[in-house]
Image (cartoon, rainbow, N blue to C red):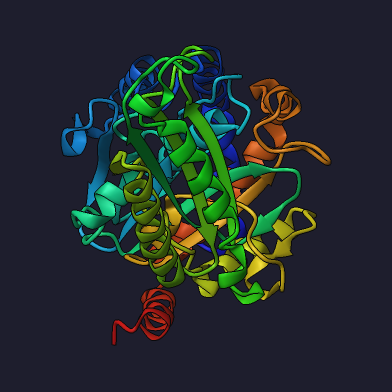
Amino acid sequence: MHNEEGLLTDIHESIEKHIEEIIDLSREIYNFAELGSMEFRSSSAIIEKLRNNGFNVQENFMDMKTAFRAEYGSGCPTVGLLMEYDALPNGHSCGHNLISAWAYGTAVVMKDLMDSGKIVLFGTPSEEGIGPYAGSKIIMANKGCFSGIDFMLGMHPDDRWCVGCKALADLQLEFTFKGKSAHMAASPWEGINALDALVTSYAAINNSRDWAGVDKHLVLGMIIKDGGRSSNVIPDRAVLEVDIRSTSSEFLNLFKERIVNLVASISRGFGTELEVNDLIPMYTEYSANTVIDQMLQEDLEKMGVKVINLDRSTEIASGSTDEANVSLKVPTGHIDMKVGDNLPGHSDLFRIASEPEKNIENLKKAILATANSALKIIKEPAILDKIKREFGDVNGKN
């Protein structure tokens, strides 16, 4: 590598060399539109391209059939890239096909230009929390998969350009009430109404919002997944799903304990049996690395991109991601790439905006910024030391 102007020129040339295959990959994943934990064709397409570019790929990573770990290079430092490819029931309405294109593009560009160091890509299923691999980054983080990574980079499509990330801690619970069926008119006293226990629990959980306090930014959503099969039969089974989010994972654990105890007492009062299941591992709040984010911002601004720095913003998080759990384990920088204006997340409008051909120029910018920042960090040990010092100070690792 040489001076920064020469490096940027080299990155531009490498991006142009690879852009067709980057967009082809994004298009494949966009058309597959596979739900979380079922991304077999998507992960296979990515793995094939990585192997064709000289990456060593470990499939079925951590016993997850659609997860993988791919690496290229040797020595230190090691940069990690997070890759998502799961869709939602209405297709890629969160733009994860573009995350894959960005991560793949950044990896092959860095491979072209690295003199030393290692690139590791993590193929992470089901960020959206669907199926057995829900929140796969949490599984990886809890099992120490990121211990050898010096710094991590992530990206997500958005309706604006941002660096940094804010995320709500999130958990999902399922309460299953088991009662006894009986004829609704002839012998209701013979039954145990599971739906009554559920409805009372629903109201009790909803009325617990005030316990949170406004500083915890509690978000609470509930649906009835099963409430019986016939209106003239006492329901012997009812299922309630609860999604709880907050800016504090510590508070979230306390709130979970409170409502589980509350629902258990209601269930006992109605005479039902109760099963409680965690539907996903808990997504934590995000711990941003401002050193990396500042570098990403400067690189984007050099291209004329107007960037919001969320690390300096007073905005409250409005979504959740398992990338947050990674940020607690390893210094993590993040870019939000603009795909349109005023786009509701998970909507058909967002899906349409995430079409690969509409995002070629912005993908080039996102790849250039992350590749340039990563290569500078690899080349200059003092920058990496600064990144790690901040991470240690913020997360109590010193």
Does residue 75 sit above or below 15 in this rendering? below
Q: Quadrant of residue 337?
A: top right
Residue 22, x across and y down, in percent: 52, 26
Residue found farthest to the right: 341
Residue 12, x across and y down, in percent: 60, 42
Does residue 147 sit above or below 347 in this rendering? below
Residue 311, x across and y down, in percent: 62, 71
Taking the image as shown, residue 211 lies to the left or right of residue 238, namely right
Which residue is more in the foreground, 276 or 283? Answer: 276
**Residue sitting at 33 percent across and 28 percent down?**
50
**Residue sitting at 18 percent across and 39 percent down?**
62
Quadrant of the snapshot with the N terminus: bottom left
**Residue sitting at 60 percent across and 32 percent down?**
95
Residue 50 shows in the view: yes
Which residue is more in the foreground, 344 or 59? Answer: 344
Residue 183, x across and y down, in percent: 42, 14
Quadrant of the snapshot with the C terminus: bottom left
Which residue is more in the foreground, 118 or 134? Answer: 134
**Residue sitting at 37 percent across and 79 percent down?**
395
Does residue 369 sit above or below 216 in this rendering? above
Taking the image as shown, residue 247 lies to the left or right of residue 363, namely left
Does residue 180 sit above or below 391 in this rendering? above
Q: Quadrant of residue 302?
A: bottom right
